[in-house]
Image (cartoon, grey):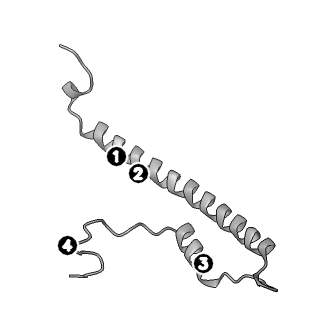
Amino acid sequence: MDKQNHDAANPRPAPVENRETKRIAQWLRKVHFKRALFGVSEKDVWKKIGELNEMYKTAIVAERVRYDTLLEAQRGEARAGAAPDDQGEQR
């Protein structure tokens, strides 16, 4: 059994990685800030924060689309599996 996917101390399932979250992770691994006299350039830091914010916005939209698609599929399965008497008909 794969210990990474199943751990008694951590019963949560592995997070779903989509294209956007992979893109953010890759960006975070590669991000570098311009050097300044006493550290890094504040202007460059704010620019990078803006870029990261836009990537997160895109990831949230993509996750919402995925969630809505899964939810609609689940609702469709529930409607298809309902017996005729279970579909709101009153006797």
Cβ–Cβ under 8 Å for marks 1 and 2: yes
Given the image, on which type of amino acid does mark 1 rest?
Gln
Q: Position of residue 53 (x, y in %)?
A: 65, 62
Among numbered discs 1 and 4, the one appearing first in the sequence: 4
Residue beneath the point at 20% across and 82% down: 1
Mark 1 and mark 3: Cα distance apart in space: 35 Å
Residue at mark 4: 8
Of marks 1 and 4, the one in the foreground: 4
The residue furthest front is 38
Mark 2 and mark 3: Cα distance apart in space: 29 Å
Residue beneath the point at 22% across and 15% down: 90
Given the image, on which type of amino acid does mark 2 rest?
Leu
Q: Secondary structure at mark 2?
A: helix
Given the image, on which type of amino acid does mark 3 rest?
Leu
Among numbered discs 3 and 4, the one appearing first in the sequence: 4
Among numbered discs 1 and 3, the one appearing first in the sequence: 3
Residue beneath the point at 29% across and 76% down: 5
Q: Position of residue 68 (x, y in %)?
A: 46, 47
**Category of crowding for the residue at label 2, using alpha-carbon neighbours closer than 10 angstroms: few (below 14), some (14–19), many (at least 20):** few
Left or right of residue 11, residue 75 in this image: right
Mark 4 and mark 2: Cα distance apart in space: 27 Å
Left or right of residue 16, residue 21 in this image: right
Of marks 1 and 3, the one in the foreground: 3
Residue at mark 1: 74
Q: Quadrant of residue 20?
A: bottom right
Mark 1 and mark 2: Cα distance apart in space: 6 Å
Q: Secondary structure at mark 3?
A: helix
Mark 1 and mark 4: Cα distance apart in space: 29 Å
Given the image, on which type of amino acid does mark 4 rest?
Ala
